Image (cartoon, rainbow, N blue to C red):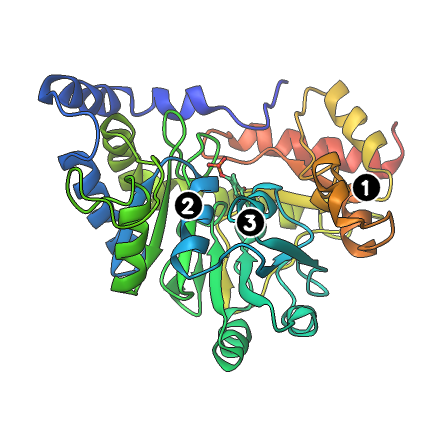
Amino acid sequence: MKVPVLDLAATHAAIRDELAGALLRVLDAGQYVLGPELEAFERELADYVEADHAIGVGSGLDALVLALRAVGVVPGDEVIVPANTFIATFLAVSQVGARPVPVEPAPGTWGLDVEAACQAITPRTRAIVAVHLFGQPCDLEPLLALARERGIALVEDAAQAHGARHRGRRIGGHGDAVCFSFYPAKNLGALGDAGAVTTRSSAIAERVRLLRNYGSPRKYQHELKGQNSRLDEIQAAALRVKLRHLDGWNARRRAIAGRYLDGLAGLSAFTLPRWLPFTEPVWHLFVIDHPERDRLQGFLAERGVGTLVHYPVPAHQCLAYAELGLAAGSFPVTEEASRTHLSLPIGPHLSDAAVEHVIASCRAFARGDA
Ligand SMILES: *Cc1c(COP(=O)(O)O)cnc(C)c1O
């Protein structure tokens, strides 16, 4: 049996007519950038994530860059980031000319550790970026309190957390600015690249709105040195269709995660995901840890089970960040996780039979059938 780690074509096939109708509507409307589909999507997204404002941009990376600029990060500043994240979190900080200051994750979950963040603050710290990694919300209340007390901004990277909840409220309106990616493989994905910033602050929303469009409130009037990073009408129309299905898709992910948690419970050497009890993860990824990760990955591949590693090389150890001068061993928890993490197949496309096959294959590995 073949179990792909993710099957986007299957997800889209199920809503093919709805999507095609939306794309043709844009084609016929004749307006392709900053039009009615974007305006409607921004309103629908803001409502969905319980924020006051949503601003569509070109990608998740751009959402982070524009959010950092909008909260006032300038060249020479320091921004605290989790060491265990996708490299885009670091790259956004670098793109605004600031320095990423990585910290180890909170013990027990993979979220940002408030103690570690607190210790990393210096007089040059301008912002903290909390990443809701794998779709599991970080502990936001102490982070918000810390940011407020120290007069720095809290930006959230919610690229993996569309629809997740923290103490009952959706991720999207807690921090100063919350950044979403709609890369196709995300829980809410476009048919190409797209992203958004959500916020409760009208001042931050206004700055992101200007920055994404040449710093321009109206044609040929330029108030800020902005960039061109807009969410186009085709993507906005597709995202509007897909947003209506997001809760259903996330519910399916939750059911699959529940089945994995039951089926893999107690397996020797397997460590299962843990999350904060007052949060509702959306299972962008289902990440287990195993000391013989590579051998397990090979064993699963032989049985047709696709898996991925998020992420095999921590950002601080990538060539791009040699400048940080962080030798191997600087972030032992993050570095160890890069050797033990394994992402099992998960997504709305996955059948019960596929899930059972993944569980049976993991159990066979644990029994020593390899
Ligand atoms: C996907 C992702 C991004 C970047 O989003 P893009 O749309 O690919 O630019 C940033 N941070 C995290 C945690 C991500 O998973």
Amino acid type at circle 1 is: Arg
Residue that carries the numbered disc 1 in the rendered image = 339
Q: Is residue 339 left or right of residue 17?
A: right
Foreground pick, 11 / 138? 138
Disc number lying in front (1 or 3): 3
Please, is residue 91 above or below residue 295 in the view? below
Assess mark 2: CB under 8 A from ligand 1? yes
Disc number lying in front (2 or 3): 3
Q: Earlier in the sequence, mark 1 or mark 3?
A: 3
Q: Residue furthest bottom?
A: 149
Amino acid type at circle 3 is: Gly
Please, is residue 186 above or below residue 156 in the view? above
Neighbours of disc 3 within 10 Å: few (<14), some (14-19), many (20+) = some
- The answer to whether residue 267 is seen in the rendering is no
Q: Earlier in the sequence, mark 1 or mark 2?
A: 2
Residue 97 is tagged as 3
Residue shown at 69%/60% (left/top)? 105
Neighbours of disc 2 within 10 Å: few (<14), some (14-19), many (20+) = many
Assess mark 3: CB under 8 A from ligand 1? no
Q: Secondary structure at mark 2?
A: helix
Quadrant into which the C terminus falls: top right
Q: Secondary structure at mark 1?
A: helix
Residue that carries the numbered disc 2 in the rendered image = 63
Where is residue 97 shown, x and y percent of the image? 55, 49
Amino acid type at circle 2 is: Ala
Q: Secondary structure at mark 3?
A: loop
